[in-house]
Amino acid sequence: MLRVVVMVSGGGTNLQAVLDAVRDGKITNAEVVGVISNKPNAYALTRAENAGIPAVCVSPKSYSEREQFNEALLAAVDSFSPDLVVLAGFLVILPELLIRSYKNRMINIHPSLIPSFCGKGFYGLKVHEEVLARGCRVTGATVHFVDEGCDSGPILLQKAVEVRQGDTPEVLQRRVMEEAEWQLLPRAIDLIANGKVAVKDGFAQIL
Ligand code: GAR
């Protein structure tokens, strides 16, 4: 059984998609053993509790120094002994030690087709605002392994989503979630849990 820790900052709809997929047998050979949030009032924490999964909050506001927060965050992740760390809307700059400790064992879901609309400052609704501002006809989502850069790690899965005339950022965000994110993230975990993914020379391969 692959031990999965999910890290969240907000509503946790991607977390919910993962929990539902485990429940429904769409993800096999994996269990979510813990959820970590940086925000004490994140609804994702409630979702974890409702599913009977241990959930902890590690807030930067509880620490006077960033380094102390970084250490606490790494300790929280390590405490679950995960095989895979899943960033599901975790909107925090990751400590380098965390990235190094979980190299090739940490994935992130991003709400665009990387390398478009990614990197510093592109997160959440902002991504969809920029897609609309550029007049794109197509957007999508990406699951990638996390490396030291910002949204720069090996790409595992992507799915395109149509942009429609009259879309607001909120409407587009919802479509990207429904048509791409909530499918891609469970699928990525299932592939990894069943030994179907290898990372080699900076590229993810589906075996
Ligand atoms: C999701 O759209 C996810 O792709 C995005 O935050 C949202 C979290 O929603 N992540 C990023 O922008 C990372 N750069 P959720 O809490 O409902 O899953």
Image: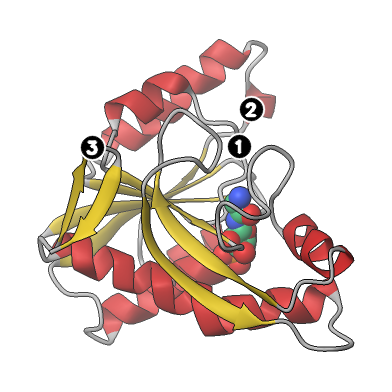
Q: Is residue 69 left or right of residue 121?
A: left
At horizontal 30% and vertical 39% (from top left) the residue drawn is 202
Residue 116 in picture, x, y percent from top left:
64, 55
Query: What amino acid type is highlighted by mark number 3?
Result: Asp
Q: Is residue 129 visible?
A: yes
Measured in 3D between alpha carbons, the distance from the residue under mark 3 to the one under mark 2, in whole angstroms, is 34 Å
Viewport quadrant of the C terminus: bottom left
Q: Is residue 130 left or right of residue 191?
A: right
Residue 124 in picture, x, y percent from top left:
70, 57
Along the viewing direction, whichever of 199 and 66 lies nearer the viewer: 199
Quadrant of residue 22 within the rendered picture: bottom left
Residue 104 in picture, x, y percent from top left:
26, 40
Q: Secondary structure at mark 1?
A: loop
Q: Is residue 51 visible?
A: no
Q: Is residue 150 left or right of residue 73?
A: right
Q: Secondary structure at mark 3?
A: loop
Q: Quadrant of ligand 1?
A: bottom right
The residue where tag 3 is placed is 201
The residue where tag 1 is placed is 92
Q: Earlier in the sequence, mark 3 or mark 1?
A: 1
Mark in the foreground, 3 or 1:
3
The residue where tag 2 is placed is 60
Measured in 3D between alpha carbons, the distance from the residue under mark 3 to the one under mark 1, in whole angstroms, is 27 Å
**Few, some or many residues within 10 Å of mark 2 (<14, 14–19, 20+):** some
Q: Earlier in the sequence, mark 3 or mark 2?
A: 2
Query: What amino acid type is highlighted by mark number 1?
Result: Val
Q: Is residue 84 left or right of residue 185?
A: left
| 1 and 2 marks in contact (CB < 8 Å) | yes
Mark in the foreground, 1 or 2:
1
| 3 and 1 marks in contact (CB < 8 Å) | no
